[in-house]
Image (cartoon, rainbow, N blue to C red):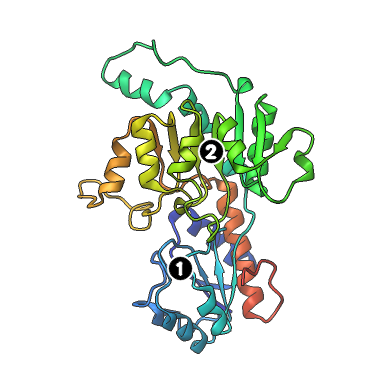
Amino acid sequence: MKILAMNAFTEEVVELKKWAQENKQDLTITETPLTTENIDQVKGFDALSVQQVVPLGSPAVYAKLAEFGIKQIAVRSVGYEFIDLAAAKANGLVVTNVPVYSPRSVAEYVLAQTMRLLRHLNQFEENAIQHDFTWLGKISPELSELTIGIIGAGHIGSAVAQIFHALGSQIMINDPVENPDLAGFATYTDLTTLLTASDVVTLHVPLTSQTMKLLSTESFAKMKASAYLINAARGQVVDTPALIQALKSGTIAGAALDVWTGEGPYFDYDWQGKDLNNSELETLLTLPNLILTPHIAFFTKHSVHNIAYTALNEAVRGASGQPVKHPVN
């Protein structure tokens, strides 16, 4: 079987090649995402796997894939918003994702950024570079004193809840489905109550029409002035201009973003020495109470291995006519 894995990064290539060797499959790997312009390179392959944030292209891309004999698009991520599911379905293409790869990887990121925000570590580090070693005015609470508000308690959100509970925090969750494993220590509540009561609000919801700009100016106004926001879900879940205003005005104390609405051309690319040509990104980078990382919450050895193996196993199943395990359409 001939398989094409597109837009692979260096560490991922290692795991993809391991999978191919172990499974004795003919695997071709590219470093570019799939687009309307390069669709013809898929011709001659039996299976396709992609990992990207930019859209696949026009509906013609899906028709071409079907014309080439592709039966499935195996996405190497949880998110698949870059795929036009209606166009895929119209052309008989199954779409699969990797719904669980390592919830702990993202949960540990949330813990790390929570500690950086609470203990003002980024500010202390920046001050030290300027030879300012003072510390007054930056006193911190301890985790056991805080309420952690988790919006979306699926695999990742539940892992976040368990970690912070183990460290003594109070856990508050907003999710329509209650996880019985969390029942002994977490309080499920409505979104307004969570925003009002939480010291740290962390997002773990998929991007849907219901979660688009879930947190807006109105949401930030409900939060404590001492509260922090962490978004390791999808950039579009947060109204970025509203967040910028909330951070500038002191409506909330700070935020850590691993995702951002306009990340596509920037995250995972080296822009050193180049003009960003994006006023919103430039503003985010100047905010002293914001930590921005380039969509790396998932980026652990365990996660990358699981993502590669799960997606390629699905690609083989789909191409050979077997039932897939993780269809999204």
SS of the residue at dot 2? Answer: helix
SS of the residue at dot 1? Answer: loop
Image position, residue 306 (x, y; %): 61, 55
Q: Which residue is mark 1?
A: 6
**Image quadrant where residue 163 sits:** top right
Mark found first going from the N terminus, 2 or 1:
1
Q: Is residue 171 depicted above or below 329 in this figure?
A: above
Camera sees residue 24: no
With 270 as the anchor, is 275 left or right in this view? Answer: left
Q: Is residue 173 depicted above or below 65 in this figure?
A: above
Name the amino acid, label 2. Tyr
Image position, residue 256 (x, y; %): 45, 37
Q: Which numbered circle lies on residue 303?
A: none
Q: Which one is nearer the viewer's eye here, 139 or 32? A: 139
Inter-mark Cα distance, 2 to 1: 26 Å
User: Which residue is at 50% across, 39% downward?
Assistant: 230
User: Which residue is at 74% across, 47% downward?
Assistant: 178
Using a 10 Å C-alpha cutoff, classify the residue at mark 1 as few (fewer than 14 neighbours), some (14 to 19) or many (20 or more).
many
Image position, residue 285 (x, y; %): 31, 39
Q: Quadrant of the N terminus?
A: bottom right
Camera sees residue 115: yes
Image position, residue 41 (x, y; %): 41, 79
Q: Which residue is mark 2?
A: 109
Using a 10 Å C-alpha cutoff, classify the residue at mark 2 as few (fewer than 14 neighbours), some (14 to 19) or many (20 or more).
some
**Given contact means CB atoms under 8 Å apart, are the residues at marks 2 and 1 in contact?**
no
The label nearer to you, 2 versus 1, is 2
Name the amino acid, label 1. Met
User: Which residue is at 60% across, 48% downward?
Assistant: 302
With 231 as the anchor, is 320 left or right in this view? Answer: right
Marks counted in the figure total 2
